[in-house]
């Protein structure tokens, strides 16, 4: 069984500090929903409020349509996986998984049966009698998930659970967590500052900044159509050129910058004469064709080969740093440090957003 989670105008204050500001979200039952943002943006506070460890100063938290006001964390249909996993080192894997059931008075034989059933679910059969110290980082992670699932929550809350793992294991565990969520079908709410985790695992993502939700959408929408300068800058790499909007027509806008006038897709609430930023993803920048007029020129400062891609560090004529990402089919090896190259991109590949504070 899964449950919807509704945050209704939730504000959370600690003394004079407002950690979360008027957040309204609807998280659908059975959804893998990520809350993405930098450290200090309020995402963990929001998770702790859903779990019952923090009460909202204003607004309501509803789970399965029921207002959670006054209902403690131990009475809510949720389970929380902490960043440090918090496995008991002297207990066996089976006893760790069955701990919540033990607290609830479930008999030992039933706890053991449930632990073995969940170990099979998280692809760890035969590990019940081991101690956590005998497991790898990824195996410990799966034990923590099994322990949380043992109490049959309707909503599983995960607070940056992969942050302590190395890159290769994190990438593997992304797929594991997503597969487990699909198998059990319950609502997952996942907190992360890692855009790669959010983009690869989530049905939808809420991007937070300074205690507020700036955008909610699936990964492709958030990446390709950010609605604020913060989202454009935080989710993926972006080159931002500041300037003034010249005009808007048929969904495209012009912007006058220190490097010249450019075209791009017009973001919402964009008006002529306003300050704005042109965002160009590194992967849409390319070397201008021979004989063609480039959109702009820049000097190569260095290259970084990364297997499938080569990242090219550039410096524009006004001193602004730019990044271009080339695929394996591009002749990146011919680009020498100090070379001046012409760059091209299409207006339909760039986005112009009205400038706001908080970048």
Image: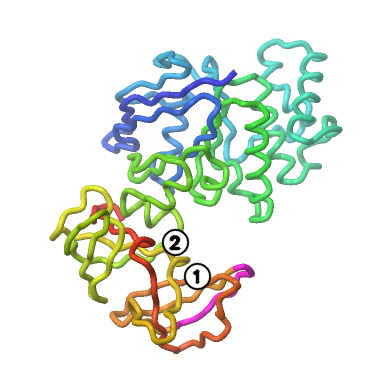
**75 is higher (above) or lower (below) than 278:** above
Whole-percent x, y for residue 306 in the image = 60, 70
Whole-percent x, y for residue 150 in the image = 68, 22
Overall secondary structure of the magenta section: strand
Residue appearing at x 42%, y 35% in the figure: 45
Left or right of 11? Residue 325 is right
Q: From which residue to which does the magenta span run?
A: 300-308
Whole-percent x, y for residue 212 in the image = 33, 40
Q: How far apart are marks 1 and 2 (CA)?
A: 10 Å
- Is 217 contained in the magenta span? no
Given residues 249 and 345, the one toward you in this image is 249
Tell me which corner region of the image, top left, top right, bottom left or bottom right, holds residue 299: bottom left
Given residues 139 and 207, the one toward you in this image is 207
Tell me which corner region of the image, top left, top right, bottom left or bottom right, holds residue 354: bottom left
Residue appearing at x 44%, y 81% in the figure: 289
Left or right of 100? Residue 267 is left
Confirm or deny contact between disc 1 and disc 2 (CB under 8 A): yes
Mark 1 or 2, nearer chain start = 2
Left or right of 146? Residue 239 is left
Tag 1 residue: 325
Q: Is mark 2 on a helix, strand or loop?
A: loop
Tag 2 residue: 237
């Amino acid at each position: 069984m899964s449950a919807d989670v509704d945050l209704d105008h939730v504000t959370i204050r600690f003394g004079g500090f407002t950690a979360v500001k008027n957040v309204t979200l609807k998280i659908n039952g059975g959804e893998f929903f990520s809350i993405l943002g930098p450290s200090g943006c309020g995402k963990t506070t929001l998770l702790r409020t859903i779990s019952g460890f923090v009460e909202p100063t204003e607004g309501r938290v509803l789970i399965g349509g029921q207002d959670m006001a006054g209902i403690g964390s131990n009475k809510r249909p949720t389970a929380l996986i902490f960043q440090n996993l918090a496995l008991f080192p002297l207990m066996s894997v089976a006893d760790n998984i069955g701990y919540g059931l033990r607290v609830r008075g479930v008999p030992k034989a039933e706890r053991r049966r449930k632990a073995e059933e969940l170990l099979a679910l998280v692809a760890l059969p035969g590990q019940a009698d081991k101690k956590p110290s005998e497991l790898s980082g990824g195996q410990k992670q799966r034990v923590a998930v099994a322990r949380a699932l043992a109490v049959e929550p309707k909503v599983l809350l995960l607070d940056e659970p992969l942050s302590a793992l190395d890159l290769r294991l994190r990438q593997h565990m992304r797929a594991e967590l997503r597969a487990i969520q699909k198998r059990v079908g319950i609502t997952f709410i996942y907190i992360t500052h890692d855009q790669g985790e959010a983009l690869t695992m989530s049905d939808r993502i809420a991007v937070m900044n300074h205690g507020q939700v700036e955008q909610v959408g699936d990964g492709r929408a958030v990446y390709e159509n950010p609605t604020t300068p913060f989202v454009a800058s935080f989710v993926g790499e972006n080159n931002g050129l500041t300037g003034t909007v010249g005009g808007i027509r048929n969904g495209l806008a012009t912007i006058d910058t220190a490097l010249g006038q450019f075209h791009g897709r017009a973001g919402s609430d964009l008006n002529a004469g306003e300050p704005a930023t042109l965002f160009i993803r590194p992967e849409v920048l390319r070397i201008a064709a021979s004989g063609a007029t480039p959109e702009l020129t820049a000097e190569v400062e260095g290259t970084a080969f990364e297997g499938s891609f080569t990242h090219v560090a550039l410096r524009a004529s006004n001193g602004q740093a730019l990044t271009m990402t080339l695929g394996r089919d591009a002749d990146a090896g011919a680009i020498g440090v100090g070379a001046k190259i012409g760059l091209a991109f299409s207006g339909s590949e760039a986005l112009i957003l009205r400038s706001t504070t908080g970048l």
